[in-house]
Image: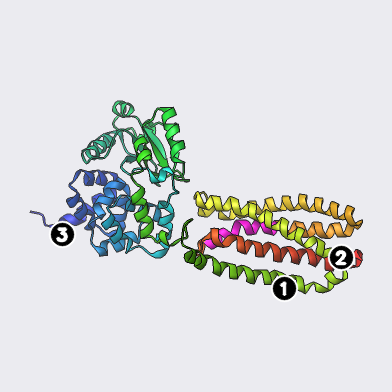
Amino acid sequence: MTDNSTLLPLVRKFFENDLNAAAGILESMPEEEAARAVKSLPIPLAVRIVKVLQVSYAAALLKDADDQFLIEMTSHLDPQFLASILMRLPPESRERMSKHISGKIKGQIREFLDYPEGSIGRAMTTDFIALKMNTRAEEAVEKIRLLAKKRYPSSYVYVVDEEGRLAGVLNMRDLMLAEPHQTLDAISRKDYFALHCFTDRQDAANELARRKFFAAPVVDSDNHILGIVKAERMIHGVQEEASKDIQRMFGAGADERVFSTIPFSLKKRLPWLHINLATAFLAAAVVALFEGIIAKLTILAVFLPVVAGQGGNAGAQSLAVVMRGIVMREIPKDKIFPLIYKEGRIGTVNGAVIGAVTALVAWWWYGNPVLGLVIGLGMLVNLILAGLAGASIPLIMKKMGIDPAQSSSIILTTVTDVMGFLAFLGFAVLFQNYLV
């Protein structure tokens, strides 16, 4: 009789050579036996096999794992997959697993799990079947049969790529008529309908009613499938309490809310007001550097609020767009620098147009074309910097773990005021002989 020491290398070799087949065997086994099999594997291989399993089944295998195994597994799984696992765990297992996740990763997971009030992200269920696009038809039939026995719904089956992005919807008739070796990518329907996780619950219900669908997949901004939403889920909001548990687990409850107490709100706001006061003195210090030229040409003081106001407004436009992108999770890491560059280009065009208009007004008002040139150049520089600052500041704040909504506008105002005054008054010094 072959002992375990001989069998183990053979099992590992099988798992390494055909992950999909191994996953199919695991999903056909009782959860206790499958959990023991996964635990016996080296961590890198266990991670690979867990990511191929149905997420709900993977969560079931991990819910009773020992602490050391969880520590090793969570350190190798990406935040998106960990978020999917946590959503499917019972509260006590979720709490235990969260203890082994680093603070930085917890913050990223909270972004995946923290859906706005009234959105379908709070109404979706994570009980669904999603199969990889390279799965063969015969394998898919067997997997669906096994998962249906484990009480996973099979009315709709979704096809995903290796990264978990929705690639199609599987029609059962097409699956039954397919050749055994055809892949799901070849037979799935690509004209699927999906809802973004931030979609308003009422809008989603109306759209499902119009299309006569009783369920639809829910995706994020990168088209990763997060769950499915049903009409009754949207009405009753059965996941509201689960979302609150997750928020508390990752510290979301510490943030200020609309009806937070006055002392709590003051504690949150006063430090930033002190910072704002310090930055206001910084802008004043820049003006003081040019006290001589302002005393000599008092007309410059008239245009200081114009420069500051336009810079602040232009920066606020960029800030609003980027803040929405952060909230909607529309800004992947590889798009950060292209986004900042784009806002800089927009700032350049805005600065050229607004600068030219301001220059003409100043020339007409005071009859000095050089004054118009000075204010126009100052406006151009300030609006370029405002666009760059409005795009980059919230992203930097988020990277530092500081709430962008609370701090970005204060820092942006400082940048636009200081740099606007510096540019405008600096050009005035350069051209002062032509301004007198």
Residue type at mark 1 is Ala
Mark 3: give few (<14), some (14-19) or many (20+) Cα within 10 Å.
few
Residue at image point 34% right, 43% down: 125
Mark 3 or mark 1: which comes first in sequence? 3
Whether 68 is drawn above or below 217: the answer is below
Residue 367 drawn at (x, y percent)? 92, 56
Residue under the point 17% across and 47% down: 30
Number of numbered discs visible in the structure rendering: 3
Extent of the magenta region: 384-397
Q: Which residue is mark 2?
A: 431
Q: Amino acid at mark 2?
A: Phe
Dot 3: element? helix
At label 1, counting other C-alpha atoms closer than 10 Å, the crowd grade (few under 14, some 14-19, many 20 or more) is few
Disc 3 designates what residue?
A: 5
Using the image as rendered, state which of residue 126 and residue 16 is in the foreground.
126
Reading the image, the residue beneath label 1 is 285
Q: Is residue 59 left or right of residue 223?
A: left
Confirm or deny contact between disc 3 and disc 1 (CB under 8 A): no
Give the percent coordinates (x, y) of residue 195.
44, 39
Picture coordinates of residue 266 (x, y %)? 52, 66
- Mark sitting earlier along the chain (3/2): 3
Specify few, some or many for label 2: CA neighbours under 10 Å numbering under 14, 14-19, or 20 or more: some
3 or 1: mark nearer the eye = 1
Q: Is residue 394 or residue 3 the one in the foreground?
A: 394
State which quarter of the image contains the C terminus.
bottom right
Residue 229 vertical placement versus 93 (above, below): above
User: Spatial distance from mark 2 to mark 1, Cα to Cα?
Assistant: 22 Å
